Image (cartoon, helix red, strand yellow):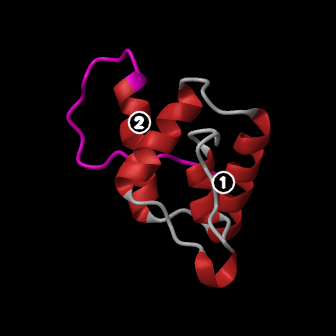
């Protein structure tokens, strides 16, 4: 059986990567995480996809690669002056 994804929403691939179950899922690469977070920040994700994505991340817990990619996406969209820091780590209750 072949899965036809030609009409699939572009964000669906990221939900699928995280949601293949205990044996089939994997974490996002840094690049995938950057792209996924960019789509979220740019409003290019459906509400149900956002909910599924965040739930799956919460369940598996974010990896360092994912956090780095998420941070890069946010920094690319901030209109803030660059600062020199040794660590740029988001803070969240997890």
Residue at screen point 44% across, 32% down: 74
Residue 87: in magenta span:
yes
Q: Main secondary structure of the magenta part?
A: loop
Location of the C terminus by quadrant is: bottom right
Q: Is residue 94 visible?
A: no
Q: Is residue 29 visible?
A: yes
Question: Which one is closest to the eye, mark 1 or mark 2?
Answer: 2
Residue topped by disc 1 = 93
Q: Position of residue 61 (x, y in %)?
A: 60, 66
Q: Is residue 89 left or right of residue 11?
A: left
Q: Is residue 18 left or right of residue 80?
A: right
Location of the N terminus by quadrant is: bottom right
Q: Secondary structure at mark 1?
A: loop
Q: Are marks 1 and 2 in contact (CB under 8 Å)?
A: no
Q: For the magenta stretch, what is the residue range?
A: 77-94
The foreground one among 48 and 84 is 48
In the picture as drawn, the residue positioned furthest to the bottom comes out as 23
Query: Dot 2: few (<14), some (14–19), or many (≥20) neighbours within 10 Å?
Result: many
Residue at screen point 69% across, 60% down: 56
Residue topped by disc 2 = 73
């Amino acid at each position: 059986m072949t899965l036809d994804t030609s009409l699939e929403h572009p964000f669906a691939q990221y939900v699928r990567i995280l949601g293949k179950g205990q044996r089939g899922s994997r974490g996002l690469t840094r690049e995938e995480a950057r792209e996924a977070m960019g789509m979220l920040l740019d409003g290019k994700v459906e509400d149900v996809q956002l909910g599924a994505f965040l739930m799956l991340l919460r369940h598996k817990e974010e990896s360092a690669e994912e956090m780095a990619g998420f941070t890069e996406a946010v920094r690319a969209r901030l209109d803030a002056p660059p600062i020199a820091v040794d660590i740029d780590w988001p803070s969240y209750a997890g």
